[in-house]
Image: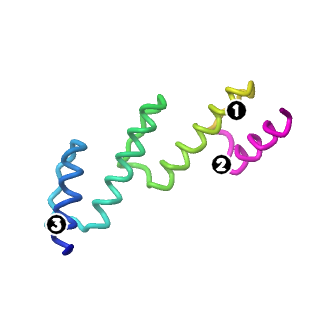
Amino acid sequence: MTDKESRVRVAGRLRDLGHEVDWQKTSFLDMTDMESRIRVSRRLKDLGHLVDWKTHSFLDLTDMESRIRIARRLADKGVDIDWQKHSFMQLIDMESQARRKK
């Protein structure tokens, strides 16, 4: 697949997500980054958190999503935790400890 074909394909997926992008002026890497951030922001919305994909990196968005999901699993085990106050690794450790207490 050529660079042009790749960019046209990603631009089409972005259009399907509701975002118009000029594939001739936007790199493949920039468009795939946009697509990834849009998809994660939609999953965050499904989790009840509105986040502007334009102001956060893909890494930041996926970190938020992971921490929210872990905090929810902890809540299911009776551990009420604020995902915003703990790092991903801290939450993983808490989840591991909660499993050991079973």
Q: Which residue is mark 3?
A: 25
Q: Which residue is mark 1?
A: 74
Image position, residue 2 (x, y; %)? 19, 75
Q: Which residue is mark 2?
A: 88
Residue found at the far bottom of this picture: 2
Question: Which mark sits nearer the N-terminus, 1 or 2?
Answer: 1
Q: Please tell me which residue is depicted at 50% across the width and 56% down the height of the picture.
A: 59
Mark 3 surroundings: few (<14), some (14-19) or many (≥20) residues within 10 A: few
Image position of 16 with respect to 36: above or below: above
Report the magenta stretch's main SS. Answer: helix
Q: In the displayed structure, does residue 100 sit left or right of residue 13? A: right
Q: Secondary structure at mark 2?
A: helix
Image position, residue 36 (x, y; %)? 37, 53
First to last magenta residue range = 84-102
* Amino acid at dot 2: Phe
- Please identify the quarter of the rendering in which residue 51 is found: top left
